Amino acid sequence: SSFSGCHLQEVVYKLNALLICCCFVFCRRPPKLRQISWLLFVFFSSDIEISRAQSPKAVDVLAKEIGLLTDEIEIYGQTKAKVRLSLLERLKDQPDGKYVLVAGITPTPLGEGKSTVTIGLVQALTAHLKINSFACLRQPSQGPTFGVKGGAAGGGYAQVIPMEEFNLHLTGDIHAITAANNLLAAAIDARILHENTQSDKALYNRLVPVVKGVRGFSSIQLARLRRLGINKTDPETLTEEEISRFVRLDIDPSTITWQRVVDTNDRFLRKITIGQANTEKGFVRQAQFDIAVASEIMAILALTTSLEDMKERLGKIVVANDKKGEPVTAEDLGVTGALAVLMKDAIKPTLMQTLEGTPVFVHAGPFANIAHGNSSILADKIALKLVGEKGFVVTEAGFGADIGMEKFFNIKCRASGLVPSVVVLVATVRALKMHGGGPSVSAGAPLKKEYTEENLQLVADGCCNLQKQIQIAQLFGVPVVVALNVFKTDSPAEVDLVCKIAKQSGAFDAVPCNHWSDGGRGAVKLAQAVEKAANQKSSFKYLYSLELPIAEKIKTIAQKVYGAQDIELSPAAQSQIDRYTRQGFGKLPICMAKTHLSLSHQPEKKGVPTGFILPISDVRASIGAGFIYPLVGTMSTMPGLPTRPCFYDIDLDPVTEEVKGLF
Amino acid sequence: SSFSGCHLQEVVYKLNALLICCCFVFCRRPPKLRQISWLLFVFFSSDIEISRAQSPKAVDVLAKEIGLLTDEIEIYGQTKAKVRLSLLERLKDQPDGKYVLVAGITPTPLGEGKSTVTIGLVQALTAHLKINSFACLRQPSQGPTFGVKGGAAGGGYAQVIPMEEFNLHLTGDIHAITAANNLLAAAIDARILHENTQSDKALYNRLVPVVKGVRGFSSIQLARLRRLGINKTDPETLTEEEISRFVRLDIDPSTITWQRVVDTNDRFLRKITIGQANTEKGFVRQAQFDIAVASEIMAILALTTSLEDMKERLGKIVVANDKKGEPVTAEDLGVTGALAVLMKDAIKPTLMQTLEGTPVFVHAGPFANIAHGNSSILADKIALKLVGEKGFVVTEAGFGADIGMEKFFNIKCRASGLVPSVVVLVATVRALKMHGGGPSVSAGAPLKKEYTEENLQLVADGCCNLQKQIQIAQLFGVPVVVALNVFKTDSPAEVDLVCKIAKQSGAFDAVPCNHWSDGGRGAVKLAQAVEKAANQKSSFKYLYSLELPIAEKIKTIAQKVYGAQDIELSPAAQSQIDRYTRQGFGKLPICMAKTHLSLSHQPEKKGVPTGFILPISDVRASIGAGFIYPLVGTMSTMPGLPTRPCFYDIDLDPVTEEVKGLF
């Protein structure tokens, strides 16, 4: 099937006409004209106004256009639908399309527009070049949406619409993750309390009660017995010793690594003491809440390949050690089935559309600094079947190529077996100037003049970061196309300089893009370059072998990707590595938790830092997701609300039901 | 329009046939026959199997049948849809149907079947008597679903289907409430931190930043200025004193009453210390998490009458006092708009169906002991229009009539202006025997023989509770029909005795019901009795005048409803009452937080306790929801997980995608 899209011209014309009319109306008062025009411009070009000016097609129409059968979708309102995984079985013999990853240079805190490039690119491919394409995006976290960053639907004329649906609850996946994560957390502490306050016999009577005269093990309990090597099925036949082993998980509270989560920027939950009510009988302990998208269950959602695989991964989650040092899993707590039930709908990707009516999957979550932050394998796989052999799937990796892309290749591609054809590396003149020594850039503060006036020297000096990120992509043997996301303050000379240096640095091509102001039309050249690059021979390879010891794998990433001289393991990190190796988890890939604001661990070090020793403060394991998770320096897993959070500007008109201020 | 329903016979026949066939197949081994038949019976008569055996009609078909227009629904999957509030405007001239409340006697911890009666009654009305009817139910909390109680979709042949949809995320309303509740909580602590660590000037610069050369107040800030009596709109013109008043909410942390919530039974969050990370600079404080359905935002959802009203209520939420003792609101924190945006879809009731294909609204939440626990006014109002003048809307109040029904009349009916026609009071022989002095009943433990063998004396003695609950309903001037939910172990003499005593005690009628085993057919007599009662003159009145002082209102409920001799206010409760009265909140109705297991505050006191003094340990205020909230004795607002939680039996078949063990 051939996908369809619409051009943006109609919308743009309408808005311009309205703008001009308004100016004329107010023309009698010339001094105000400029001000009013400006206000109108700001109003009509705000992301949410653009989003609203284009009415999305009904999602069942979109689904039909891209070849989905009626019983393969579950509609959520007019503009969102979940897509069933049965599709993968139906299309299993269909060849995959081309697989394009969008990554970036080391960003400023404002972000450099990877989402807009992703959307601009698919708009260009499908609506302008008539090549089937799919964008696979991550669902934004409500933390940043109401906190500092705002939404993540793209922007300008390269957006997912309706952006308020995209940026709010969507189809509830993150809420499902929160519910599952916190059920497991509650199960851990409750179990410790019950074991500490009851005899073996009392525990056994409660865990295996007589129901309607019959006493039997549940299937989860039978599985536990088998793991314990107790091959009995009649509860009356267990010896006292077997009963004791069966009823006691003997969790060592000091080893609990499973944290509670909320999808809210709630800094006061970064370190807390729990269990202080009398009913918990003194079993207090220190704990923390993480932001929901950092949950291992989010990582599982992104990396799973089927419902069966997801259930297996959920069961394998290691939450703590027992007092003998053996791992305690979700399965041991008897909660695998409940977690799978809570996640049964979340596993289905959500279908939406771009401003130009081309299809988008939204699935899994962001935060490539503290998580792997990639969109889901399932969304990518389904999209690769739907676009057909000549089509393109454009998926996004969070933050700079040093973290999002590295994890995409070494973790996600390993789990999926998919081979990427092209990397699109997004750069901005703004970020390059920062890397060249420009003044600091922060959210909320006005940009310094270096960023709004031509400064070729800063750009040239900053291109070292671009060059390094190109080289990182090349380590994996995949051709790189640089997409320069052009701002209206960028001079032609600056744009040319970046493209020239990019090509000299080994990029297959480098193209200026104007999708923010022009939609897909502004990214046609990028689309053409990507199409050409996809025909290049890709000699994709992983950066390290899984057989290497954990510390060696960390060192490989630190040296080859970040440019560190060496790594330094804290005693805690070393002992965790030893423990995980002993427990048999040494062959997993590595998911670094590192700042996204520098190639190094120090956010203020811009450009290409060298000679630094990367400090590994701690190492954790996400056994269900399937990776080892080293913490580089101090990484907060819970953002905070600033003095003036985004929610200050968010409002709802109770009459029109319009959402305001959501960017 | 005339609603349509289907009878259950087809399903029942199929299951029976299957059961008989299976028995024959295994007949060659007679000793096993009984056991196998029993297992088959248990399997085929489990709630989830019954739910699955009947395939629901597509929700758009159902919507059409009950007279909804295509653009008045938002479909969520095949079996759920949200209904837009615009309907109320379209049908505003349509007369309302009859309004029936289902309440109960003081229950055992197992529950006495109010939900099944509600569903059986609408199945009888619509599918059997061809009278339009609607059931309005509450969305279950995931806490009990995975904890002790299990789901709340009804049971047997009187269920909402598909029950796994009903019992899991539904359309995300409780998740939206959790998100909104916790955003407000995070905003409070973050604001205190920022005020404590910044000068007036720094705060002002951050709260009112220069954006693109312009400095302006947001609309929320302009509203705050007006409340402060500062009639200025240009940020440059405020005096230092005005700036200080504007930027500082000066929240007194010891007065914070706004708690965080999760929809999980997580007992370790009952009392916690937050803010212990270094980044929070020592501003630690004691806090707690409540179960999500106890959030004031849930109460607002249930009591609101429009989007505009909801937004206003959200803004009025009082979260703490400032250091001068004045209330600090959500509006002061600038979060009203964001809360409204998060709740914009939750305000729309969710349409589902019974096993016999009749319509059901699911909206707002349970926990009538620690909240008001009624379904929503909006769902009731929409349903009353849809059924037409001769139709019936059956809505449910949580737990015994002493708490759920009392709150329904005094709080919910006051907010809605709706007048109920009939109260259906659900009783069981089991609960009456408990009130008559039978042994204690608890979840998980097998029932004692008193409950499975005929015992007329225990029944007769326990009817005092039924009589008292009938009298409570009569205080409000509404006719009472007693629905005796018959179990297979109840003897005909026991059933007759209850009905006789009920009628002697002033019930309009008393009817045995067999909806669990027979669906709507088993509740036809109840439906006929309700229809007759609805033609009686109802002389509905509230129990107390809002003009009474807070303590007098509490005393009225304690004495007239619970049968207390008096109340005893703790010093904390007295000082809160004084404060709320001073702050102008004295004219609100009362929402008691009291155990549901006794008419008194002591769960072990069954029957009709007398001569007790009701201890009021504390008093809180839900200003947005619009009630004062006294705590009777110690009431936990966070349930715990037992040693063997429900999740032990919950599983997902990854191949068929079937959910198992959800009751």
Image: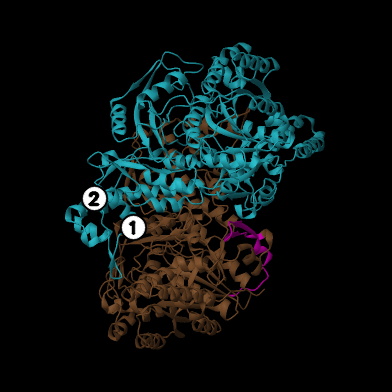
Chain colours: A brown, B cyan
Inspect the magenta stretch and tell me whether residue A84 lies in it: yes
Res B254 → quadrant: top left
In this view, A449 is above or below B325 = below
Q: Which mark is residue B248?
A: 2
Residue situated in front as seen by the camera: A327 or B346: B346
Element marked by disc 2: loop
Span highlighted in magenta in the image: A72-97
Circle 2 or circle 1, nearest the eye: 2
Q: Is residue B79 above or below residue A45?
A: above
Residues flagged by tags 2 and 1 on a common chain: no
Q: Residue B516 location, x and y as percent?
A: 67, 31
Q: Is-magenta flag for residue B195?
A: no
Return the residue found at the far top.
Answer: B457
Residue type, label 1: Pro
Lateral position of residue B321 relative to residue B90, left or right: left
Q: Please report, as a chain letter, where disc 1 is located.
A: A
Q: Residues within 10 Å of mark 1 (few under 14, many from 20)?
A: many
Front one among A388 and A471: A388
In the picture, which quadrant includes the C terminus of chain B?
top right
Q: Which residue is mark 1?
A: A645
Residue B398, x across and y down, in percent:
52, 31
Asked whether the residues under the numbered discs 2 and 1 touch, taking CB atoms below 8 Å apart as contact, a structural biologist would say no
Query: In this rendering, would B237 be left or right of B437?
Result: left
Q: Which amino acid, mark 2?
A: Arg
Which image quadrant: the N terminus of chain B?
Answer: top right
